[in-house]
Image (spheres, rainbow, N blue to C red):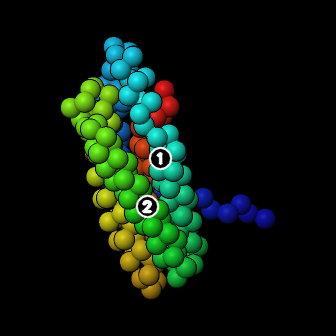
Amino acid sequence: MEAPATNNQIPGELGIWLFVAGDLIVFSVFFILIALGQKENADIFVQSRGKLDLWVGVLNTLLLLTASWFVAIAVERCRTGLGATASRYFSLGILCGVGFVANKSLEWGSKITQGINPATNEFFMYFFVFTGIHLLHVLVGIGVLCLLRSVSRSPGLNERRIRTLESGATFWHLVDLLWVVLFALLYLL
């Protein structure tokens, strides 16, 4: 019995991987800035971190991890010829992304109501700026997921469309990864 053929090609298009690499480099600089700020102003970071609601960050993490799980299921369904059911999973991923946006908006609103904003101190400057940049990624990602849901509904998913789905999913997983690191740096350390 012969082993099944394996696809040694990376998922998605090369361009998305170059974009991911560039975005990871930029966010690595952000992560280093947070770490250096923590080192230089440990007391301010500890006190400020204590003003964050850990459970808001946990909920956001769970929302993005769950969205990535739904997106992975959707792409796999498309690959195996079950594209008709994939759009439901993309919709669930979109719903999780919208939940993240709502939760982050409520968190920011709460902080601003308490008089906390980017000018409060270095920690909150990093908090608002870097979670804001990440939030823009989430909003773009939701748009990408809407496109993927539409593509998944197309009859006859060919290799080109599958690669489009893989590329979009790769971007969404990047958004998820970036949040996990931001969560650890801002809420946990």
Q: Identify the residue at image location x=50%, y=31%.
A: 188
Q: Secondary structure at mark 2?
A: helix
Rendered location of residue 23, percent (x, y): 31, 42
In the rendering, at what x and y percent does residue 83 appear?
Answer: 52, 78
Amino acid type for the residue under numbered disc 2 = Gly
Label 1 neighbour load within 10 Å: few <14, some 14-19, many 20+: some
From what the image shows, is residue 134 above or below residue 182?
Answer: below
Numbered mark located on residue 99 in the image: 2
**Residue 181, placed above or below residue 102:** above
- Label 1: state its secondary structure: helix
| Residue 24 seen | yes
Quarter in which the N terminus is drawn: bottom right
Q: What residue sits right under mark 1 in the picture?
A: 56
Whether 166 is drawn above or below 123: the answer is: below
The label number, if any, that marks residue 68 in the structure image: none
Nearer to us: label 2 or label 1: 1
**Residue 155's image quarter?**
bottom left
Q: Nearer the viewer, residue 152 or 98?
A: 98
Q: Residue furthest left?
A: 119
First along the sequence among labels 2 and 1: 1
